[in-house]
Image (spheres, helix red, strand yellow):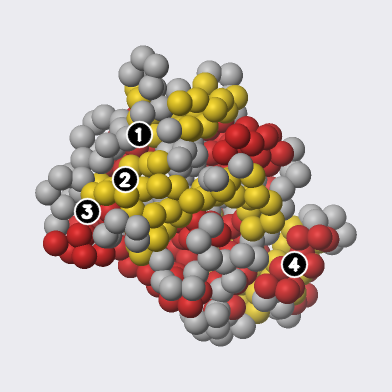
């Protein structure tokens, strides 16, 4: 199969790998599309350590080819060959302490085996070069390829009518946004929200917030083009920080109170610090933006203590429940999956896609579509 492989030096190269073979509890998927995410870019730029060579790409849609040996009756029923599916980037083992507590987004095996070593949960990769059988690491399922292997715990069948290619962004962009609002912020109908950064995840946050009945949704960015689109997706207010201070604008919009929740979707020191100061007394600042390893932000201790501000990290969501909940919102017309997708690339153009993402030339979410 063809795959876009990250080599030393940060370049993605089109190479031929063996078609991977699923083991117990896994499936082989023919990839339809894969999202282009900033988290991959951090790895490509060596800002986050990860073994190479590797296949990046961690939000995919596709169709089931086969299941691994000993598949359960439940999996055989849900995932017959040809079933269209989407897969989440967090692939829960369902066996560790966190998974047993329902905290799949903190799965111990996912972080130790996959994010730590580019492997699945038997301690080995499923990817090998065709020419010499050399192992290739997997970032999540390694979706920038014609085929991938993914644990069935991370996969959900697509509901009828969902756009096949664009459904790939259910697995990270919408998945991360949903987890931030539902599981981390625990946002309630009628509350107020500010979103710092309106790219792929930010635009998904706007849509999900409106679907959840959030009364005031403030989009904060530096791009008039992106902010105009956020108004169309459901933002009640837009703030361009090139023209006005984010904190001053939020204070004015909320009559001096601040918002109930801020979600920071950039991983920037400045926006991290502003997020803490933008919430009202007792408010929640939820951080989803990833920064290069070692980057630190300062926060005012006394303000946090006296005002009972919660700072909450949020990484992904829970595949066993949240993927299907997201699809339900789409099927009801409350979320437009196609709206965040602004660019489409081929697998041969994957390196170009990430270079353009790094240059700030992609607004919203780009996807790589297999042909």
Q: Is residue 127 above or below residue 212?
A: above
Task: Give me the residue at 30% from left, 63% from top.
Answer: 320
Q: Earlier in the sequence, mark 4 or mark 2?
A: 2
Give the Cα separation between the discs numbered 1 and 2. 9 Å
Q: Earlier in the sequence, mark 2 or mark 3?
A: 2
Q: Which residue is mark 1?
A: 19
- Nearer to the camera, 151 or 50: 151
Label 2 sits on a secondary structure element that is: strand
Give the Cα separation between the discs numbered 1 and 3. 26 Å
Residue contact between numbered discs 4 and 2, judged by CB atoms under 8 Å: no
Q: Position of residue 74 (x, y in %)?
A: 18, 64
Q: Is residue 66 above or below residue 252?
A: above
Give the Cα separation between the discs numbered 2 and 3. 19 Å
Q: Relative to 93, is 160 on the left or the right?
A: right
Q: Which numbered marker is on residue 229? A: 4
Q: Which residue is mark 2?
A: 28
Q: Which residue is mark 3?
A: 94
Q: Earlier in the sequence, mark 4 or mark 1?
A: 1
Q: Relative to 90, is 212 on the left or the right?
A: right
Residue contact between numbered discs 1 and 2, judged by CB atoms under 8 Å: yes
Q: Which one is closest to the eye, mark 4 or mark 1?
A: 1
Give the Cα separation between the discs numbered 4 and 2. 37 Å
Give the Cα separation between the discs numbered 4 and 1. 40 Å
How packed is label 2: few (under 14 Cα within 10 Å), some, or many (20 or more)? Answer: many
């Amino acid at each position: 199969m063809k795959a876009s492989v990250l080599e030393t030096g940060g370049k993605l190269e089109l190479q031929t790998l063996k078609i991977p073979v699923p083991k117990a509890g896994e499936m082989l998927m023919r990839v339809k599309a894969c999202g282009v995410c900033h988290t991959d870019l951090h790895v490509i730029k060596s800002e986050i350590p990860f073994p190479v060579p590797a296949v990046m790409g961690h939000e995919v849609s596709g169709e089931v080819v086969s299941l691994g040996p000993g598949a359960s009756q439940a999996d055989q029923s849900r995932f017959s060959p040809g079933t269209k599916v989407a897969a989440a980037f967090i692939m829960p083992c369902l066996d560790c302490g966190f998974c047993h507590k329902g905290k799949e987004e903190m799965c111990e095996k996912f972080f130790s085996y996959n994010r730590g070593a580019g492997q699945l949960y038997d301690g080995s990769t499923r990817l090998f070069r065709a020419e010499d059988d050399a192992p290739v690491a997997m970032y999540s399922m390694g979706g920038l390829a014609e085929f991938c292997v993914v644990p069935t715990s991370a996969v959900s069948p697509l509901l009828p009518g969902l756009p096949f290619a664009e459904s790939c962004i259910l697995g990270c962009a919408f998945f991360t946004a949903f987890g931030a609002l539902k599981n981390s912020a625990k946002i309630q109908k009628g509350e107020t929200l500010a979103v710092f950064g309106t790219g792929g995840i930010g635009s998904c946050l706007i849509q999900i917030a409106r679907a959840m009945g959030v009364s005031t949704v403030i989009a904060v960015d530096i791009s008039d083009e992106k902010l105009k689109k956020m108004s169309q997706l459901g933002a009640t207010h837009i703030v361009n920080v090139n023209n006005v201070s984010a904190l001053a604008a939020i204070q004015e919009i909320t009559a001096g109170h601040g918002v109930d929740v801020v979600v920071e979707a950039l991983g920037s020191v400045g926006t991290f610090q502003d997020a803490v100061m933008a919430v009202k007394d007792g408010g929640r600042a939820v951080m989803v933006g990833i920064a290069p390893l070692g980057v630190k932000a300062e926060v005012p201790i006394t303000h946090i203590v006296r005002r009972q501000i919660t700072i909450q990290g949020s990484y992904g969501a829970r595949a066993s429940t949240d993927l299907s909940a997201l699809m339900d919102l789409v099927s009801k017309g409350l979320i437009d999956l196609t709206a965040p997708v602004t660019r489409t690339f081929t697998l041969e153009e994957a390196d170009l896609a990430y270079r353009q993402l790094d240059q700030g030339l992609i607004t919203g979410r780009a996807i790589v579509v297999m042909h």
